[in-house]
Image (cartoon, helix red, strand yellow):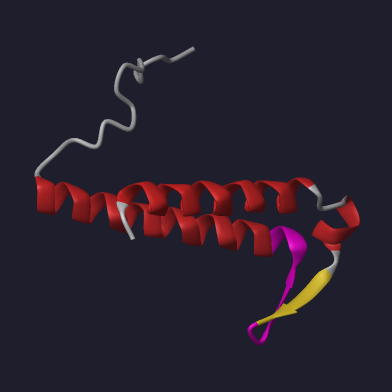
């Protein structure tokens, strides 16, 4: 698939994830769930999924920087040294 299709799929997946997370109740987050042989709270599962996605984002970023020798510019134009 080309870049445009990939970005569309990623955007759709993220929108779906946001909707699912926004739809979780306090009871859903406190309840225990059995996932892939583990019993975890809803909160732990959400955190694991976010962490997992972040890990893969880091992998993509690293390979992009190594292969293309570019600055990804994730924080371009933002003042990051604010201490307040």
In percent of the image, x 49 and y 54: which residue is there? 9
In percent of the image, x 33 and y 27: which residue is there? 75
Percent from the top left, x then y, of residue 79? Answer: 35, 15
Residue placed most toward the observer, 9 or 70:
9
In the rendered structure, the answer to whether residue 51 lies left or right of residue 4 reads: right
In the rendered structure, the answer to whether residue 75 lies left or right of residue 19 reads: left
Residue farthest along the right direction in this orientation: 27
In the rendered structure, the answer to whether residue 8 lies left or right of residue 73 reads: right
In the rendered structure, the answer to whether residue 36 lies left or right of residue 74 reads: right
Residue placed most toward the observer, 45 or 67:
67
Region in magenta = 36-44
In percent of the image, x 20 and y 50: which residue is there? 64
Percent from the top left, x then y, of residue 3? Answer: 32, 50
Percent from the top left, x then y, of residue 59? Answer: 30, 58
Query: Which image quarter: residue 41?
Result: bottom right
Whether 43 is drawn above or below 61: the answer is below
Q: Is residue 10 magenta?
A: no
Q: What is the quadrant of the N terminus in the image?
A: bottom left
In percent of the image, x 78 and y 74: which residue is there? 33
């Amino acid at each position: 698939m080309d870049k445009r299709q990939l970005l569309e799929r990623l955007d759709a997946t993220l929108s779906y994830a946001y909707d699912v997370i926004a739809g979780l109740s306090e009871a859903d987050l406190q309840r225990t769930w059995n996932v892939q042989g583990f019993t975890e709270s809803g909160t732990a599962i959400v955190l694991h999924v976010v962490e997992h996605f972040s890990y893969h984002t880091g992998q993509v970023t690293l390979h992009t920087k190594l292969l293309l020798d570019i600055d990804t510019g994730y924080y371009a134009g933002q003042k990051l040294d604010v201490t307040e």
